[in-house]
Amino acid sequence: MKVFADVYGWGKRRYLVAAVAGLGWLVFSGIPTDIIDTPLFVRMTPVEWWNYPFWLTSAVLAGLLAATYVAGPGRGGSNRFQGKVLGGGLLSVFAIGCPICNKLVVLALGASGAFTYFTPIQPILGLLSVGLLLYALRVRLSVTRSCPVH
């Protein structure tokens, strides 16, 4: 895939940032959604099989995106396109989280509304999240190719 062709010439520093950021995203999104089981709280609905692919994919994409913000040798970094990254990350958390545990969803729809209306759209939110993160990564990689500042 041409989008990821640029990743291979990054150097050790960017790969390290990508790995640390990806692992950080796994923890940052896995604990509050209780995909990573902790004694802090109990998820009220079971983790669905499709939560894992969205969780892992968003972590990989978030790690790669974080690495694009690391300045290459002798170059400056950039903070552009962070809205797409934040939007994709938030959608990812909504997609993999427990609908009843999500206070915003329960406040807006009630507990029965969360099951009736929010649960069926969670896979769609996961797809939108991955799509938005892929788009942000594509834009970031094209900017780093074309702009000498990056």
Image (cartoon, rainbow, N blue to C red):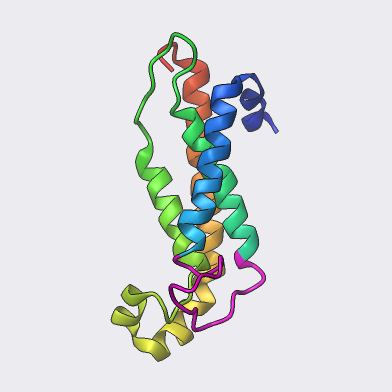
Does the magenta portion include 35?
Answer: yes
- Foreground: 52 or 112? 52
Viewport quadrant of the C terminus: top left
Depth check: give the residue in front, 120 or 47: 47
Residue segment shown in magenta = 32-51
Q: Is residue 134 visible?
A: no
Q: Is residue 8 left or right of residue 99?
A: right
Question: Whole-percent x and y of residue 13?
Answer: 54, 23
Which residue sits furthest bottom? 112
Q: Nearer the viewer, residue 120 or 62?
A: 62
Figure check: 135 above or below 89: above
Q: Residue at x 55, y 70 (%)?
A: 37
Residue appearing at x 34%, y 87% in the figure: 110
Judge left or right: residue 1 versus residue 39: right
Write the residue at 56% across / 49% down: 59
| Membership of 61 in magenta stretch | no
